[in-house]
Image (tube, rainbow, N blue to C red):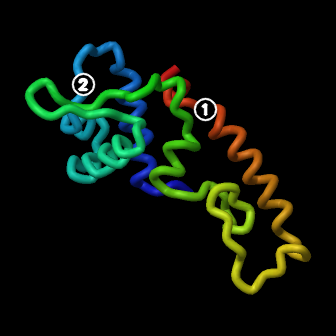
């Protein structure tokens, strides 16, 4: 299950993609208002997305947030990993955040194979779904 923070990040990015024809950046207050996201929480999320270069920002009267790269090049896996970390349901099957499970012997684990399949299918879907495709 994704966190509320991740859901808000995806909603904000989708809102921005819908409004990408605007020549000016979008204020966080506008996104918060239109998407029903608490403003302070959204500002922290947008800063995090800026820090990993998904977004860029500018202060002032003509400021706000805009994409650092096209929304069709930003995939759900990237956003989810930035906001929530691992996508895999078990740490022992995570590609980027591997950790052994407690009290488990991986070489004889009866559930690991199923969760590797779930991970692979999940990554296939999320890794091929861009922010732009959520708008289309």
The residue under the point 27% across, 53% down is 41
Q: Whole-percent x and y of residue 47?
A: 30, 46
From what the image shows, is residue 102 above or below residue 17? below
Q: Whole-percent x and y of residue 32?
A: 25, 40
28 horizontally vs 128: left or right:
left
Residue 25 - label = 2
Q: Whole-percent x and y of residue 67?
A: 37, 28
- Label 1: state its secondary structure: loop
52 horizontally vs 120: left or right:
left
Alpha carbon separation for disc pair 2 and 1: 24 Å
Residue 61 - label = none
- Screen quadrant of the N terminus: bottom right
- Label 1 environment density (alpha carbons within 10 Å; few <14, some 14–19, many ≥20): some
Q: Whole-percent x and y of residue 6?
A: 44, 50
Residue position marked by numbered label 1 in the rendering: 129
Place residue 105 in its image quadrant.
bottom right
The residue under the point 73% across, 68% down is 92
Q: Nearer the viewer, residue 49 or 136?
A: 49
The residue under the point 24% across, 50% down is 38
- Label 2: state its secondary structure: loop
Q: Nearer the viewer, residue 57 or 19?
A: 57
The residue under the point 78% across, 81% down is 104
78 horizontally vs 104: left or right:
left
Reading the chain from its start, which is encountered first: label 2 or label 1?
2
- Label 2 environment density (alpha carbons within 10 Å; few <14, some 14–19, many ≥20): some
Q: Spot the residue most to the right.
A: 108
Q: Nearer the viewer, mark 2 or mark 1?
A: 2
From what the image shows, is residue 131 above or below residue 5? above
Q: Spot the residue most to the left.
A: 61
Place residue 57 in its image quadrant.
top left
Place residue 94 in its image quadrant.
bottom right
């Amino acid at each position: 299950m994704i966190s509320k923070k991740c859901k808000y990040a995806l909603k904000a990015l989708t809102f921005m993609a819908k409004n990408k024809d605007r020549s000016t950046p979008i204020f966080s207050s506008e996104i918060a208002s239109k998407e029903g996201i608490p403003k302070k929480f959204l500002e922290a999320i947008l800063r995090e997305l800026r820090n990993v270069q998904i977004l860029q920002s500018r202060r002032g009267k003509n400021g706000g947030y805009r994409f650092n790269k096209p929304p069709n090049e930003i995939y759900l896996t990237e956003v989810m990993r930035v906001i929530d970390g691992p996508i895999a349901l078990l740490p022992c099957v995570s590609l980027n955040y591997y950790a052994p499970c407690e009290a488990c012997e991986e070489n004889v684990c009866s559930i690991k194979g199923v969760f590797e399949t779930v991970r692979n299918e999940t990554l296939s879907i999320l890794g091929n779904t861009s922010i732009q495709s959520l708008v289309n």
